[in-house]
Image (spheres, rainbow, N blue to C red):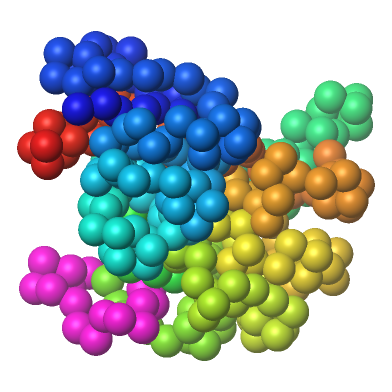
Amino acid sequence: MKILITEFMDSNSIDDLKNNFEITFDETLWKNTKKLKEIIKDYDGLIVRNKTQVNKDILSNANNLKFIGRLGVGLDNIDTELCKTKNIHVQPATGMNADSVAEYVISSSMSLIKKIPIFHYGTVKGDWPRTTIKSAEINGKCIGIVGFGTIGRKVADYSLKNGLNVLAYDPYIKKLGDNEKNYKLSSLGDIFKDADIISLHLPLTEETKNLINRSSFLKMQKQPIIINTSRGSVVNENDLIDAYDQNLISGFALDVFENEPIKKDLCERITSEMNCILTPHISGVTTESNIRVSDFIVKKAIDFF
């Protein structure tokens, strides 16, 4: 069996694959869709992250493809419906980067509640803003988790350990488990009303695109912090910046964006004086999570074939 890897992966996991398959590893191939389309016909398996667009154009030429391993959890770059019709198994690495994302959410929450980005900017500029900016503590605050799957639940666990009250919203969950009595299942409206921090953990679908928009921000009563580690288009980015400028929210952390890398017009709207954190889609990517994700997909590929 031949497996093609188009993005970065743990080297030890690649060696494990080589013990079982014929491997082609080119972590820049996701950029060359023409070449990918030409060679995909020769492969039984494909391993990708979020950059490789496994769309109809690619799949139409994937005559031997039986398995797609996703080094992560989001599947919006893979035409899963077409994969079903072609009997191609799509395997995400569910749960393998949940701890990494949860740490990102909590550390960002702490940083933004304490206004560290603003303090940093003022200190570097020489203003020494020790008494002019008010910060707060995370303990006792309320976090609203929108999307209560594997990662959302892990964020809830980390939040509880750090003294946060947890509200959870997920339209597909009607009742929490007996071991989740410390969380409260809530409506989206109540999260907008009561949360000091709102953390998003949603797939990108027609229903979730621009879910957080100007109308949402107008309903937020506690000037919350917004943290998005799911997909960029879940939040309307221009409405988010407008909301910050109008003091409807007090800060934001964005690890995902509608366009990645982000476009110049968005860069121009975000200044170093803002209470915000921007990162290049790395909340789920750490040394440890990369090993877990890679090992998981290797095991699933071996089991499948």
The residue at the point 51 percent across, 65 percent down is 204
167 and 128: which is toward the camera: 167
Residues 289 and 4: in front is 4
Horizontal and vertical percent position of residue 242: 83, 68
Relative to 102, say whether 236 is above or below: below
Q: Determine which quarter of the picture holds residue 241.
A: bottom right
For the point 38% across and 77% down, which residue is it? 169
**For residue 207, side relative to residue 232 (left or right):** left
Inspect this view and state whether residue 24 appears: yes
Q: Position of residue 292 (x, y in %)?
A: 25, 30
Q: How many marks overall?
A: 0
Up the image or down, 126 lies above or below 101; here it is above
In the shown orientation, is residue 118 left or right of residue 224? right
Residue 97 image-quadrant placement: top left
Residue 170 counted in the magenta span: yes
Q: Quadrant of residue 153?
A: bottom left
Is 54 rendered above or below residue 209? above
**Is residue 161 in view from this perspective?**
no
Is 121 on the left or on the right of 284, as rendered?
A: right
Say left or right for 155 vs 29.
left
Say which of 277 and 138 sits in front.
Answer: 277
Give the quarter of the figure containing the C terminus: top left
Residue for point 50% across, 72% down: 205
Tell me which segment is drawn in magenta.
164-182
Give the image location of residue 288, x and y in percent.
Answer: 32, 25
**Residue 120 x, y percent position in the rendering:** 75, 32
Residue 113: in magenta span: no
Image quarter (top left, top right, bottom left or bottom right) of the N terminus: top left
